Amino acid sequence: MIVVLKNEAKPEQIENLKTWLQSMNIGTHISVGVNHTIVGLVGDTSNVDMDLIGSLDIVEKVQRIQEPFKNANRKFHQSRLVVDINGTKIGGGEFQIIAGPCSVESREQICYVAESVKKSGAGFLRGGAFKPRTSPYAFQGLHGEGIELLLEAKKLTGLPIVSEIMNISHLPLFEKVDVVQVGARNMQNFDLLKELGKTDKVVLLKRGLANSIDELLMSAEYIMAGGNENVILCERGIRTFETRTRNTLDLSIIPVLKKLTHLPVVIDPSHALGYSYMVKSMALAATAAGADGLMIEVHNNPSKALCDGAQSLTPEAFDDVAKAVFQIRPFACKFE
């Protein structure tokens, strides 16, 4: 349920409304816009008297909503979320490319790639310190050392860093990481999501391999219900019957999410497809469709990569993709 307040509503009246609703065990989410203030009611509103609320002097209208995600709902937010990390913005018309290797392997590797992707226009540096792998015998990442190397690359280039967290116990290691990535396999690790909801970290939440859009939004809701509203949604392909690509990249998620939520939407063609030769076309398609950003894997020597070399672009190939993306960006689909 959402309550739209009149322009002349005073702060003390709004506070009284909040207190009254909280006495009925109803949480509130307040969004202040240019013309209206919207109060989102969070919790079991089945017994709330809509007519009584609508009769209040400060209320313009009351509307029930059906979606179970409240904090992530577009109806609660008049403006789209713009995530701002020391001046690097994404969402609400601000577009960024997140680029870097699947896994941090060495100081030389991550620093070289960081400098290369920055020159090509990337706004964020990605790199895995902890790597979830299908095989227990595969390279699992450098862990804490990997994060330290990412921080060195950040100091060298100024790029905000993005890295994946695997476990709640690792959270202290991410204190200086700008964007904490929750991978597809952890999308419904609700204990982890709750803990991230207690932080002020920007969270990049990837869609699970076999999860619906509503399930993705409910996972975002877990984070936002804890008080952390800085969530970026990421589509990285879903598992279907198709075997010619690693996963099936669902670009239809862009207009759907733009209708349902105010959160930024990023597309990861590298993980979705699994092969570098497909990345450019899908990166262009995602950009044209109105994505707020791209996540692209870049490695200085993909054939020798310890993780996902087949889907990684060389710095030269990434430069070509970035130039093409920025050329079509002015003509991309816009969403109000």
Image (cartoon, grey):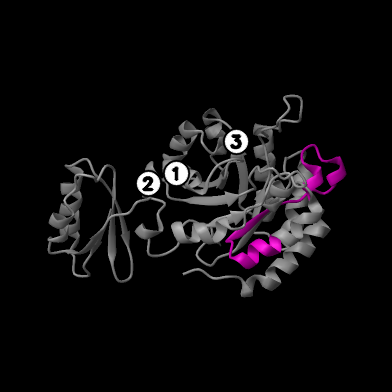
Residue sitting nearer the eye, 95 or 311: 311
State the image quarter where residue 89 is shown: bottom right
Point 77% across, 58% down: residue: 318
* Distance CA(mark 2)–CA(mark 3): 22 Å
| Residue 190 drawn at (x, y percent) | 47, 34
Which residue was labeled with disc 3?
A: 185
The picture places residue 159, in percent across and down from the top left corner, at: 64, 54
The image shows residue 71 at horizontal and vertical percentages of 38, 50
Judge from the rendering whether residue 120 lies leftward or rightward of residue 204; answer left or right.
right
Q: Residue at x 73, y 40 (%)?
A: 104
User: In the picture, residue 98 is in which quadrant?
Assistant: bottom right
- Tell which residue pokes out farthest to the bottom in this image: 331
Q: CA distance from mark 1 to mark 2?
A: 8 Å
Q: Which residues are magenta?
A: 283-312
Q: Residue at x 72, y 45 (%)?
A: 242
Q: Is residue 310 magenta?
A: yes
Pick whichever of labels 1 and 3 is earlier in the sequence: 3
Residue found farthest to the right: 303
Residue type pointed to by label 1: Met
Secondary structure of the residue carrying tag 2 is loop
Q: Can you say whether 134 is above or below 294 in the image?
A: above
Amino acid found under the numbered disc labelled 3: Arg
